[in-house]
Image: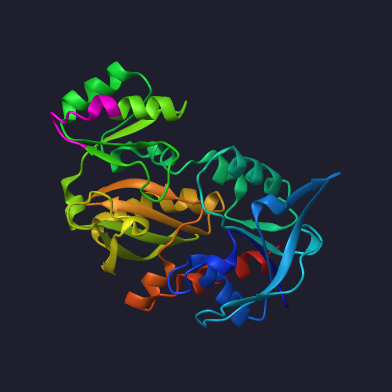
Amino acid sequence: MTYRIAFQMDPMEGVDINADTTFALAEVAMERGMMLYEYGPEHLVYNEGRIQAWARPMQVRRVEGSHVSFKDRRLIDLEDDIDVVWMRQDPPFDMAYITAAHMLERLKGKTLVCNDPEWVRSCPEKILPLDYPELMPETLISRHKPAIDAFRAKHKDIILKPLFGNGGAGVFLVKEGDGNYASLIEMFMESSREPIIAQAFLKDVTFGDKRIIIINGEAVGAINRIPLKGETRSNMHVGGKAVPTELTLSDMKICDAIGPMLKERGQILVGIDVIGTKMTEINITSPTGVQELKRFSGVDAAALAWDAIEDKLAST
Protein backbone atom coordinates (compact mmCIF):
# COMPACT_ATOMS: atom_id res chain seq x y z
CA MET A 1 0.00 0.00 0.00
CA THR A 2 1.26 3.51 -0.84
CA TYR A 3 0.81 5.71 2.21
CA ARG A 4 0.20 9.44 1.86
CA ILE A 5 2.22 11.55 4.29
CA ALA A 6 1.89 15.24 5.15
CA PHE A 7 4.70 17.03 6.98
CA GLN A 8 3.59 20.10 8.95
CA MET A 9 6.93 21.83 9.27
CA ASP A 10 9.09 24.87 8.71
CA PRO A 11 9.95 25.16 5.00
CA MET A 12 11.88 22.14 3.72
CA GLU A 13 13.99 24.41 1.50
CA GLY A 14 15.85 25.73 4.53
CA VAL A 15 16.83 22.49 6.30
CA ASP A 16 20.34 21.10 6.71
CA ILE A 17 20.13 17.76 4.94
CA ASN A 18 23.01 16.37 7.03
CA ALA A 19 21.40 17.19 10.39
CA ASP A 20 17.65 17.72 10.07
CA THR A 21 15.50 14.95 11.53
CA THR A 22 12.44 15.82 9.43
CA PHE A 23 14.50 15.48 6.27
CA ALA A 24 15.63 12.02 7.45
CA LEU A 25 12.00 11.01 8.05
CA ALA A 26 11.00 12.25 4.59
CA GLU A 27 13.95 10.49 2.98
CA VAL A 28 13.03 7.12 4.48
CA ALA A 29 9.39 7.66 3.51
CA MET A 30 10.40 8.23 -0.10
CA GLU A 31 12.57 5.12 -0.07
CA ARG A 32 9.46 3.18 1.00
CA GLY A 33 7.40 4.55 -1.88
CA MET A 34 5.22 6.92 0.12
CA MET A 35 3.65 10.07 -1.34
CA LEU A 36 4.81 13.21 0.46
CA TYR A 37 3.26 16.63 1.06
CA GLU A 38 4.66 19.62 2.91
CA TYR A 39 2.90 22.59 4.49
CA GLY A 40 3.45 25.05 7.33
CA PRO A 41 1.20 25.64 10.32
CA GLU A 42 0.04 28.87 8.67
CA HIS A 43 -1.44 26.72 5.85
CA LEU A 44 -3.61 24.68 8.24
CA VAL A 45 -7.37 25.24 7.86
CA TYR A 46 -10.47 24.32 9.84
CA ASN A 47 -13.37 24.64 7.39
CA GLU A 48 -16.91 23.65 8.38
CA GLY A 49 -15.86 20.53 10.23
CA ARG A 50 -12.97 19.54 7.96
CA ILE A 51 -9.26 19.84 8.74
CA GLN A 52 -7.45 20.88 5.57
CA ALA A 53 -4.09 22.27 4.49
CA TRP A 54 -2.71 24.14 1.53
CA ALA A 55 0.11 21.69 0.84
CA ARG A 56 2.82 21.10 -1.73
CA PRO A 57 3.46 17.62 -3.16
CA MET A 58 7.12 17.02 -2.33
CA GLN A 59 10.09 14.86 -3.27
CA VAL A 60 13.40 14.86 -1.39
CA ARG A 61 16.89 13.67 -2.28
CA ARG A 62 20.24 13.80 -0.49
CA VAL A 63 21.79 16.31 -2.89
CA GLU A 64 23.29 19.52 -1.52
CA GLY A 65 21.60 22.53 -3.09
CA SER A 66 18.90 20.44 -4.75
CA HIS A 67 17.45 18.38 -1.91
CA VAL A 68 13.76 19.07 -2.48
CA SER A 69 11.32 19.71 -5.31
CA PHE A 70 7.66 20.65 -5.15
CA LYS A 71 4.56 20.73 -7.28
CA ASP A 72 2.04 23.56 -6.99
CA ARG A 73 0.40 24.06 -3.63
CA ARG A 74 -3.10 22.59 -3.44
CA LEU A 75 -5.86 22.22 -0.86
CA ILE A 76 -5.85 18.73 0.67
CA ASP A 77 -8.19 17.18 3.20
CA LEU A 78 -6.14 15.74 6.05
CA GLU A 79 -8.82 13.16 6.77
CA ASP A 80 -9.60 11.84 3.28
CA ASP A 81 -6.36 12.52 1.40
CA ILE A 82 -3.70 11.69 4.01
CA ASP A 83 -2.76 8.62 6.07
CA VAL A 84 -0.16 10.22 8.39
CA VAL A 85 0.51 13.78 9.48
CA TRP A 86 3.90 14.52 11.02
CA MET A 87 3.69 17.60 13.28
CA ARG A 88 7.31 18.73 12.97
CA GLN A 89 7.42 22.54 13.05
CA ASP A 90 9.98 23.89 15.47
CA PRO A 91 8.92 25.49 18.75
CA PRO A 92 8.54 27.95 20.53
CA PHE A 93 5.68 26.23 22.24
CA ASP A 94 3.35 29.22 22.08
CA MET A 95 -0.36 29.71 21.42
CA ALA A 96 0.16 29.23 17.68
CA TYR A 97 1.73 25.83 18.39
CA ILE A 98 -1.04 24.89 20.82
CA THR A 99 -3.74 25.97 18.34
CA ALA A 100 -2.22 23.81 15.60
CA ALA A 101 -2.23 20.86 18.03
CA HIS A 102 -5.89 21.48 18.86
CA MET A 103 -6.77 21.45 15.17
CA LEU A 104 -4.82 18.28 14.38
CA GLU A 105 -6.34 16.59 17.43
CA ARG A 106 -9.67 16.64 15.54
CA LEU A 107 -8.20 14.00 13.20
CA LYS A 108 -8.03 11.42 16.00
CA GLY A 109 -9.54 8.11 14.90
CA LYS A 110 -9.34 9.19 11.26
CA THR A 111 -5.76 10.11 10.37
CA LEU A 112 -2.69 9.17 12.40
CA VAL A 113 -0.86 12.25 13.70
CA CYS A 114 2.69 11.88 15.02
CA ASN A 115 3.36 12.74 17.70
CA ASP A 116 -0.18 12.56 19.10
CA PRO A 117 -1.15 16.26 19.29
CA GLU A 118 -3.44 15.87 22.30
CA TRP A 119 -0.46 14.91 24.42
CA VAL A 120 1.98 17.25 22.67
CA ARG A 121 -0.14 20.23 23.73
CA SER A 122 -0.70 18.77 27.22
CA CYS A 123 2.95 17.85 27.92
CA PRO A 124 5.29 20.85 27.63
CA GLU A 125 8.84 19.59 27.49
CA LYS A 126 10.06 21.14 30.74
CA ILE A 127 6.83 20.35 32.63
CA LEU A 128 6.32 16.69 31.67
CA PRO A 129 9.45 15.61 33.61
CA LEU A 130 7.80 16.91 36.80
CA ASP A 131 5.91 13.62 36.88
CA TYR A 132 9.27 11.98 37.63
CA PRO A 133 10.88 14.21 40.30
CA GLU A 134 13.25 11.44 41.37
CA LEU A 135 14.82 11.49 37.89
CA MET A 136 15.24 15.29 37.69
CA PRO A 137 17.63 17.85 39.13
CA GLU A 138 16.15 19.94 41.92
CA THR A 139 13.68 22.25 40.16
CA LEU A 140 11.60 25.34 40.89
CA ILE A 141 8.93 26.89 38.65
CA SER A 142 7.68 30.28 39.77
CA ARG A 143 7.37 34.02 39.11
CA HIS A 144 7.57 34.76 42.82
CA LYS A 145 10.99 36.34 43.35
CA PRO A 146 11.29 35.46 47.06
CA ALA A 147 10.78 31.79 46.10
CA ILE A 148 13.46 32.04 43.42
CA ASP A 149 15.77 33.83 45.87
CA ALA A 150 15.33 31.05 48.43
CA PHE A 151 15.98 28.37 45.81
CA ARG A 152 19.17 30.14 44.77
CA ALA A 153 20.29 30.53 48.38
CA LYS A 154 19.85 26.79 48.90
CA HIS A 155 21.55 25.55 45.72
CA LYS A 156 24.14 28.35 45.17
CA ASP A 157 24.77 27.84 41.43
CA ILE A 158 21.55 27.57 39.43
CA ILE A 159 20.29 27.53 35.86
CA LEU A 160 17.56 30.01 34.88
CA LYS A 161 15.60 29.50 31.66
CA PRO A 162 12.26 30.30 30.05
CA LEU A 163 9.66 27.63 30.73
CA PHE A 164 8.63 27.33 27.09
CA GLY A 165 11.94 28.16 25.39
CA ASN A 166 13.85 25.97 22.96
CA GLY A 167 17.25 25.47 21.39
CA GLY A 168 19.13 26.79 24.42
CA ALA A 169 17.76 30.33 23.96
CA GLY A 170 17.57 32.37 27.16
CA VAL A 171 19.40 29.81 29.32
CA PHE A 172 21.67 31.35 31.97
CA LEU A 173 24.05 29.92 34.56
CA VAL A 174 23.86 32.11 37.65
CA LYS A 175 26.69 31.39 40.05
CA GLU A 176 26.71 32.20 43.75
CA GLY A 177 27.33 35.91 44.15
CA ASP A 178 26.65 36.72 40.49
CA GLY A 179 25.81 40.44 40.31
CA ASN A 180 23.68 39.94 37.20
CA TYR A 181 21.07 37.89 39.05
CA ALA A 182 18.64 40.71 39.81
CA SER A 183 18.86 42.06 36.27
CA LEU A 184 18.19 38.61 34.80
CA ILE A 185 15.11 38.18 36.96
CA GLU A 186 13.86 41.60 35.83
CA MET A 187 14.48 40.66 32.20
CA PHE A 188 12.49 37.43 32.53
CA MET A 189 9.63 39.19 34.32
CA GLU A 190 9.40 42.02 31.79
CA SER A 191 9.67 39.86 28.66
CA SER A 192 6.90 37.39 29.53
CA ARG A 193 4.03 36.64 31.91
CA GLU A 194 5.20 33.03 32.19
CA PRO A 195 6.91 31.50 35.22
CA ILE A 196 10.66 30.96 35.21
CA ILE A 197 12.19 27.53 35.59
CA ALA A 198 15.20 27.31 37.89
CA GLN A 199 17.26 24.17 38.37
CA ALA A 200 20.25 23.25 40.46
CA PHE A 201 23.35 23.46 38.26
CA LEU A 202 24.64 20.04 37.24
CA LYS A 203 28.44 20.14 37.03
CA ASP A 204 28.38 17.00 34.87
CA VAL A 205 27.29 19.19 31.95
CA THR A 206 31.00 19.79 31.25
CA PHE A 207 31.09 16.13 30.15
CA GLY A 208 28.09 16.68 27.87
CA ASP A 209 24.32 16.71 27.65
CA LYS A 210 23.14 13.37 26.34
CA ARG A 211 20.27 13.20 23.83
CA ILE A 212 18.58 9.80 24.02
CA ILE A 213 16.26 8.84 21.16
CA ILE A 214 13.14 6.88 22.14
CA ILE A 215 10.96 5.25 19.47
CA ASN A 216 7.46 4.17 20.51
CA GLY A 217 8.55 3.92 24.13
CA GLU A 218 11.87 2.10 23.55
CA ALA A 219 15.32 3.67 23.80
CA VAL A 220 17.24 3.02 20.57
CA GLY A 221 20.45 4.98 21.13
CA ALA A 222 22.05 8.24 22.17
CA ILE A 223 24.46 10.98 21.20
CA ASN A 224 26.36 13.28 23.52
CA ARG A 225 26.49 17.05 23.01
CA ILE A 226 29.58 18.77 24.36
CA PRO A 227 29.35 22.51 25.08
CA LEU A 228 31.85 24.94 23.63
CA LYS A 229 34.65 26.03 25.95
CA GLY A 230 33.28 28.67 28.29
CA GLU A 231 29.67 27.82 27.38
CA THR A 232 27.10 26.17 29.67
CA ARG A 233 24.62 25.27 26.94
CA SER A 234 25.31 22.17 24.86
CA ASN A 235 22.49 22.56 22.33
CA MET A 236 23.71 22.12 18.77
CA HIS A 237 21.82 25.30 17.85
CA VAL A 238 24.36 27.25 19.91
CA GLY A 239 27.52 25.41 18.92
CA GLY A 240 27.40 22.22 20.96
CA LYS A 241 29.37 19.40 19.34
CA ALA A 242 27.74 16.01 18.84
CA VAL A 243 29.94 13.03 19.72
CA PRO A 244 29.29 9.27 20.02
CA THR A 245 28.19 7.80 23.32
CA GLU A 246 26.56 4.70 24.79
CA LEU A 247 23.47 4.15 26.89
CA THR A 248 24.34 3.53 30.54
CA LEU A 249 22.42 1.62 33.19
CA SER A 250 21.32 4.98 34.61
CA ASP A 251 20.08 6.06 31.18
CA MET A 252 18.11 2.85 30.79
CA LYS A 253 16.54 3.28 34.23
CA ILE A 254 15.21 6.66 33.10
CA CYS A 255 13.98 5.30 29.76
CA ASP A 256 12.31 2.30 31.37
CA ALA A 257 10.49 4.64 33.76
CA ILE A 258 9.07 6.97 31.10
CA GLY A 259 8.85 4.66 28.07
CA PRO A 260 5.44 3.09 28.82
CA MET A 261 3.92 6.55 29.34
CA LEU A 262 5.29 7.83 26.02
CA LYS A 263 4.00 4.80 24.12
CA GLU A 264 0.57 5.00 25.74
CA ARG A 265 0.34 8.68 24.76
CA GLY A 266 1.22 8.06 21.11
CA GLN A 267 4.65 9.69 21.17
CA ILE A 268 6.43 7.89 18.34
CA LEU A 269 9.65 9.91 18.21
CA VAL A 270 10.98 11.43 21.43
CA GLY A 271 14.32 12.87 22.49
CA ILE A 272 15.14 13.17 26.17
CA ASP A 273 18.02 15.18 27.61
CA VAL A 274 20.16 13.68 30.36
CA ILE A 275 23.06 15.31 32.23
CA GLY A 276 24.96 12.83 34.39
CA THR A 277 22.19 10.78 35.98
CA LYS A 278 19.45 13.41 35.76
CA MET A 279 16.79 13.99 33.08
CA THR A 280 16.23 17.66 32.28
CA GLU A 281 13.73 17.60 29.39
CA ILE A 282 11.41 15.28 27.46
CA ASN A 283 11.28 16.62 23.89
CA ILE A 284 8.14 15.58 22.03
CA THR A 285 7.51 18.56 19.72
CA SER A 286 10.20 18.16 17.05
CA PRO A 287 13.13 16.30 18.62
CA THR A 288 16.46 16.24 16.80
CA GLY A 289 19.54 13.99 16.83
CA VAL A 290 18.37 11.21 14.50
CA GLN A 291 20.96 11.84 11.78
CA GLU A 292 23.84 12.12 14.26
CA LEU A 293 22.77 8.85 15.89
CA LYS A 294 22.82 7.06 12.54
CA ARG A 295 26.20 8.57 11.66
CA PHE A 296 27.81 7.48 14.93
CA SER A 297 26.13 4.13 15.59
CA GLY A 298 24.39 2.96 12.43
CA VAL A 299 21.01 3.00 14.26
CA ASP A 300 18.43 4.40 11.84
CA ALA A 301 15.85 5.91 14.19
CA ALA A 302 13.91 7.39 11.25
CA ALA A 303 13.41 3.91 9.79
CA LEU A 304 12.45 2.56 13.22
CA ALA A 305 9.90 5.36 13.60
CA TRP A 306 8.35 4.41 10.24
CA ASP A 307 8.32 0.74 11.26
CA ALA A 308 6.28 1.70 14.34
CA ILE A 309 3.93 3.85 12.27
CA GLU A 310 3.37 1.20 9.63
CA ASP A 311 2.57 -1.29 12.40
CA LYS A 312 -0.03 1.14 13.76
CA LEU A 313 -1.54 1.68 10.33
CA ALA A 314 -1.69 -2.05 9.64
CA SER A 315 -3.51 -2.71 12.90
CA THR A 316 -6.29 -0.15 12.30
Residue 180 lies in magenta, yes or no?
yes
Residue 105 x %, y %: 68, 46
State the residue at coordinates (37%, 49%).
257
Residue 105 lies in magenta, yes or no?
no
Residue 99 x %, y %: 65, 41
What span is in magenta? 174-183
State the residue at coordinates (53%, 70%).
23
Q: Is residue 129 above or below residue 285?
A: above
Q: Would residue 207 be found to the left or right of residue 37 on screen?
A: left
In this view, the residue farthest toward the top is: 146
User: The N terminus is located in which quarter?
Assistant: bottom right
Q: Nearer the viewer, residue 12 or 200?
A: 12
Q: Nearer the viewer, residue 37 or 179?
A: 179
Residue 124 x %, y %: 48, 41
Residue 71 x %, y %: 74, 74
Q: Nearer the viewer, residue 313 or 10?
A: 10
Q: Nearer the viewer, residue 294 or 256?
A: 294
State the residue at coordinates (56%, 78%).
67
State the residue at coordinates (41%, 36%).
163
Task: Give the quadrant of residue 235.
Answer: bottom left
In this view, the residue farthest toward the right is: 48
User: The C terminus is located in which quarter?
Assistant: bottom right
